[in-house]
Image (cartoon, grey):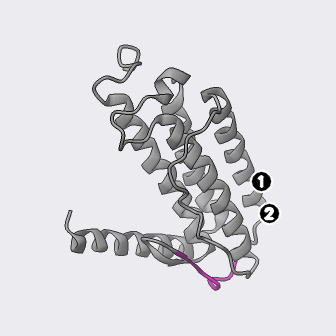
Amino acid sequence: MTSADQQAEFDRMHSYYQSQGERYSFSELWPRAVKARLELLESLEGVGDAEAEWSPSAEDWSIKEVAHHVINGSRNTRRLVQALSAGDTGDSSDIDPPRKTTGASMDQLRTELREDGIEWAAVTQALPPTPPLEPTAPHSMFGELHARAWYLFQRTHDLDHKGQIEDVKAADGYPGASEVS
């Protein structure tokens, strides 16, 4: 993909986040977000620690690294959505945390992801029905986003990383390949 094509995709996503976030309330966006989280959790079903620690190459993330990243990014995004919804400035600098290893087991990571999804539901209920569209906070690729745009971002973030997990599981040499259908 050329840099012009990539920028066009970033602009398209920015427009999507902004327009959908302006059009729909948090409660209307919530089913989309929870569905994405459930799909992410489903992609982790049956993945044991040995499979989760494996990666196709030194450059590729392991499933554990992906799950750990999603948990940390989701928590940071939730705090940002809460701040922006209250009309406060928020810190978006750690929304997309870097690759990190974790000693957590896959059972622990699945539990944390499930509990994080439940926390999103509780926060959604507590958010104002019509939050301000200002202030915004910058995303490194998609530009300035308001609270509901950031909320919707978490949905696509979960889905992107679900795809990353599926790619690892489909890679040659994946230890659980005979068990994956």
Above or below residue 73? Residue 63 is above
Who is closer to the viewer here, 105 or 151? 105
Please say whether residue 101 is one of the residues in the magenta stretch. Answer: no
| Residue 78 seen by the camera | yes
Residue 137 shown in magenta: yes
Prevailing secondary structure class for the magenta stretch in the rendered image: loop
In which quarter of the view is residue 55 placed?
top left
Q: Residue at x 35, y 37 (%)?
A: 167
- The answer to whether residue 161 is left or right of residue 21 is left
x and y percent of residue 63 in the render?
A: 48, 35
Task: Answer with left or right where residue 23 lies relative to residue 81.
Answer: left
Foreground of the two, 97 or 164: 97
Residue with the most extreme front position: 58
Report which residue position mark 1 lands on: 122
Residue 130 versus residue 59 in the image, above or below = below
Residue 25: percent from left, percent from top: 63, 68
Q: CA distance from mark 2 to mark 1?
A: 7 Å
> Badge 1: few (under 14), some or many (20 or more) residues near its Cα, within 10 Å?
few
The location of residue 76, given as percent across then percent down, is 65, 60
Q: Considering depth in this image, is 29 or 119 the residue closer to the camera?
A: 119
Badge 2: how crowded within 10 Å, few (<14), some, or many (20+)? few
What range of the chain is rendered magenta?
Answer: 129-138
The amino acid at mark 2 is: Ala
Residue 178, horizontal then vertical, whole percent: 36, 14
Classify the position of the C terminus by image quarter: top left
Q: Is residue 66 above or below residue 124?
A: above
Residue tagged by mark 2?
Answer: 126
